Amino acid sequence: MPVVGVVIAIVSSFINGSTFVLQKKGILRARISGRTYLSDCLWWCGTLAMIVGQIGNFLAHNTAPAILVTPLGALGVLSGAILASCLLQEHLNILGKLGSVLCCCGSVVLIIHSPKSESVASRTELEERLLDPMFLSYIALVVLLLAVLIGWLSPAFGQSNIMVYVSICSLLGSFTVPSCKGLGLAAKEAFSNFSTDNRALYLFLCLLGILIVSILIQFAFINKALESFSSNMFEAIYYVVFTSSVIIASAILFREWETLSIFDCLGILSGFITVSAGVTLLNISQDAVLMWSPAKVKKE
């Protein structure tokens, strides 16, 4: 029932909103005590909340239309900002509050006007989409960008420019979301009693490996970002860029751009302008300048 899916999505959004705040609190407590954050219970509570929240999102998308479920993710940004002000004393000024609202509103507009994925009913059809030259070109571009971001920009500029870590985590969404969608189709044939084709099993293991690696890398850089930047600012910008990255990857994989109307194009443009303004205001409010300056190392 759609109502059940919407309720699950709302609860999951609030849970997801607490993840970065709890992890940030754990990192701060570990830094004060001189321990690693892996030994802090609050950090593990945030990690557990992230897992539960993602499971909730998966269930919500399977019980209600994505057009209803996905925009509710913006509630996590707002709840996270409220929790951060109470638990971390990260109080946004008027520009930061306006930036968060613009990010949420712009992301909802992007989701509403984004192309809707056509159902892929078989593993064979999924393989054809994955081997499409346009999608392979896009994945190659994403891998190249990730190599530059992780190999060069992250060590040099990661601690001074929040967009480096945000870009790494968001671009990895180009792998996680298609992998999640494909695992279900591949699993049906791979573990079927009547299946004699090993291709389905190989596809399942390949997608599972890509999903695990991308999640682990994403998880590592999320914590790097939380060590250097405000949790509510990171969460708002990350939500925007991750959503945009997933929309682009899904549109290319499922050839969704063919169904876009002029009205949808204008809606996407207005949403992009809105989120860009929101991200800019958030950076200005937190003095996180978008300059490519080397990170300053503090001497204790």
Image: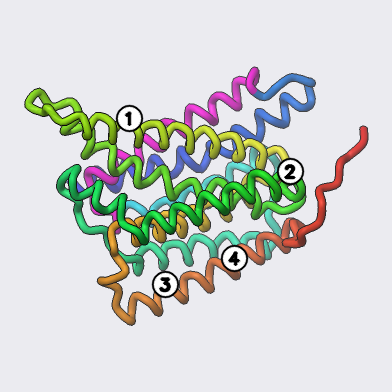
Between disc 2 and disc 4, whose residue precedes?
A: 2
Up-down relation of residue 275 to residue 131 (above or below): below
296 and 175: which is toward the camera: 175
Q: Are marks 3 and 2 in contact (CB under 8 Å)?
A: no
Q: Residue furthest bottom?
A: 262
The secondary element bearing badge 4 is classed as helix
Amino acid carrying mark 1 in the image: Leu
Residue position marked by numbered label 4 in the rendering = 278
153 and 226: which is toward the camera: 153
* Crowd class of label 4 (few under 14; some 14 to 19; many from 20; radius 10 Å): many
Left or right side of 282 for 180 = left
Left or right side of 154 for 248 = left
Look at the image and tell me whether residue 81 can be seen.
no
Residue 205 image label: 1
Between disc 4 and disc 1, whose residue precedes?
A: 1
* Crowd class of label 3 (few under 14; some 14 to 19; many from 20; radius 10 Å): many
Instruction: Specify the segment rendered in magenta.
Output: 38-67
Cα–Cα span, label 2 and label 4: 26 Å
Question: Percent position (x, y) of residue 58?
Answer: 32, 40
The secondary element bearing badge 1 is classed as helix
Q: Residue furthest right?
A: 300
Amino acid carrying mark 3 in the image: Ile
Residue position marked by numbered label 3 in the rendering = 268
Cα–Cα span, label 1 and label 2: 32 Å
Q: Residue furthest left?
A: 194
Is label 2 or label 4 in front? 2
Residue located 22% across and 44% down the image: 63
Residue position marked by numbered label 2 in the rendering = 155
Amino acid carrying mark 2 in the image: Pro
Left or right side of 29 for 279 = left
Residue located 66% across and 60% down the image: 282
